[in-house]
Image (cartoon, grey):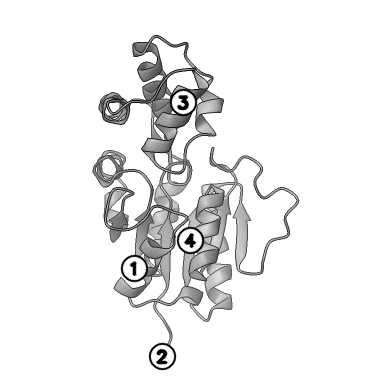
Amino acid sequence: MTPRPLIVFDLDGTLVDSQRDLAAAANALIVERGGQPQDEAAIARMIGEGAALLVKRALTAAGLELDAGSLPRFLELYDERLLETTVAYPGIPDALRLLSSRGPVAVLTNKPLGPTRRLLDGLGLTPFIAAAIGGDGSFPRKPDPAGLRDLIARFGSAPEATVMIGDSRFDFETARAAGTRAVVTRYGFGYQDFLEGQELEESVRTVDRASDLPEAVASLLGEAGGR
């Protein structure tokens, strides 16, 4: 029996461009603590492993101490800015519409689930998403593959019929650890150059635009017998 196709998205830098709001919240925390704001691009390079590490890295870069109130205050500041400038990348709604016709589409992110759902709702993406797992749930954060494996089991798929889509090395490593196929979104702010010079496996595609996602996924699922 052919396994059910499953498409799993990262959130920040893959579905949504949230760089400016995340950087603004981090800099607001830094300024509150008496530090100097950091460059937006520098903060973007700190994103990907969850809010706690982002806060630690941002404060350290500003020469400030991390304390027990740092993370809760950052989350408050970010909550106030969650949808100020954040948008879905161009082509994402159409890509989700096409991909959700192939099989279930899920989100696996290191962002807490509450703001994840608010973003998906606020940007009109929720109707396309069958499930979402955040970084504050019962699974370890990416690149641990436990959350991805849970989604595979939940939707009756298989690693070879699952595509993990993300912009960072954490998404790439998650897919590799779970044995799934992967699409790397080079348009995302988490991409940087972590794959430059690295030869990709046959189970990986890269895209420069969200509009290219359906074709990349179709190619991978075709190889897996998922058409």
Question: Which label was assigned to residue 164?
Answer: 4
- Percent coordinates x, y for residue 67 in the rendering: 33, 26
**Can you tell which of label 1 and label 2 is closer to the viewer?**
1
Instruction: Give neighbour class at mark 3: few <14, some 14-19, many 20+ (Cα, 10 Å).
Output: many
- Percent coordinates x, y for residue 108 in the rendering: 38, 55
Q: CA distance from mark 1 to mark 2?
A: 20 Å
Q: CA distance from mark 3 to mark 2?
A: 49 Å
Q: Taking 179 as reference, is 145 above or below it?
A: above
Q: Which sits earlier in the primary sequence, circle 3 or circle 2?
A: 2
Q: Nearer the viewer, residue 227 or 82?
A: 82
Determine the residue positioned at 52% across, 48% down: 210
Residue annotated with mark 3:
58
**Can you tell which of label 3 and label 2 is closer to the viewer?**
3
Q: CA distance from mark 4 to mark 3?
A: 28 Å
Q: Which sits earlier in the primary sequence, circle 4 or circle 3?
A: 3
Residue annotated with mark 1:
150
Numbered circles on residues, count: 4
Question: Which label was assigned to residue 1?
Answer: 2
User: Label 1 is placed on what type of residue?
Assistant: Asp
Residue 155 visible in image: no
Q: CA distance from mark 2 to mark 4?
A: 22 Å
**Can you tell which of label 2 and label 4 is closer to the viewer?**
4
Give the quarter of the image for residue 183.
bottom right
Label 3, secondary structure: give it: helix
Determine the residue positioned at 66% across, 69% down: 202
Label 4, secondary structure: give it: strand
User: Label 2 is placed on what type of residue?
Assistant: Met
Instruction: Give neighbour class at mark 4: few <14, some 14-19, many 20+ (Cα, 10 Å).
Output: many
Quarter of the image with the N terminus is bottom left
